[in-house]
Image (spheres, rainbow, N blue to C red):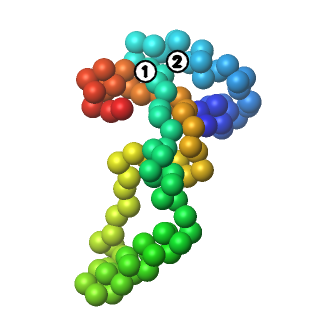
Amino acid sequence: MIQNFAASIAKTSVSMWWVDQFVKRNSSQIILHWTTGIDSNRHNADSEEKYSLYFSLLQEKIKKYSIEPRHTYNMDEKGFLLGITTRSKRIFSRQLFESKEVR
């Protein structure tokens, strides 16, 4: 993803090693760290039937309590990517990562 962002900004393709070289050049400010894959319980709960049930219940509560769209928010504490169940590398601010503000 970062390779694509860099290519878009540079308006030319960048090599597949560009990200690694970028991290090395900026290692005092950024750090690479492996993320964990999606939790197995979460993966097992991933089904069309459960999503349908969830959204039906959500719609029922929205109507019951007259919740306006401008008062709804979506967030996820894990920050997992749909369809990605394996580990992946992420880039963090070194200062925030070492102070354990982000993981």
Question: Is residue 38 found left or right of 68 in the rendered image?
Answer: right
* Labels 2 & 1 near each other (Cβ < 8 A): yes
Disc 2 residue type (three-letter): Val
Figure label count: 2
* Residue denoted by label 1: 30
**Quick one: 9 or 99, which is closer to the camera?**
99
Question: What is the x, y in percent for residue 91?
Answer: 47, 28
Residue at the spot x=74%, y=30% of the render?
A: 13
Asked which quadrant contains residue 99, the reply is: top left
Asked if one can make out residue 9 in the rendered structure from this viewpoint, the answer is no
Asked if one can make out residue 4 in the rendered structure from this viewpoint, the answer is yes
Residue 65 versus residue 70 in the image, above or below: below
Question: Is residue 55 found left or right of 10 in the rendered image?
Answer: left
Q: Is mark 2 on a helix, strand or loop?
A: helix
**Neighbour class for label 1 at 10 Å: few (<14), some, many (≥20)?**
some
Asked which quadrant contains residue 47, the reply is: bottom right
Which label is found at residue 43? none
**Quick one: 3 or 49, which is closer to the camera?**
49
* Residue denoted by label 2: 23
Question: What is the x, y in percent for residue 97?
Answer: 34, 25
Disc 1 residue type (three-letter): Ile
Question: Is residue 83 found left or right of 69 in the rendered image?
Answer: right
Q: How far apart are marks 2 and 1 (CA)?
A: 7 Å
Residue at the spot x=61%, y=37% of the render?
A: 1
Question: What is the x, y in percent for residue 3?
Answer: 64, 31
N-term-proximal mark, 2 vs 1 = 2
Question: Is residue 27 found left or right of 60 in the rendered image?
Answer: right
Question: What is the x, y in percent for residue 10?
Answer: 66, 31
Residue 83 versus residue 89 in the image, above or below: below
Residue at the spot x=25%, y=84% of the render?
A: 65
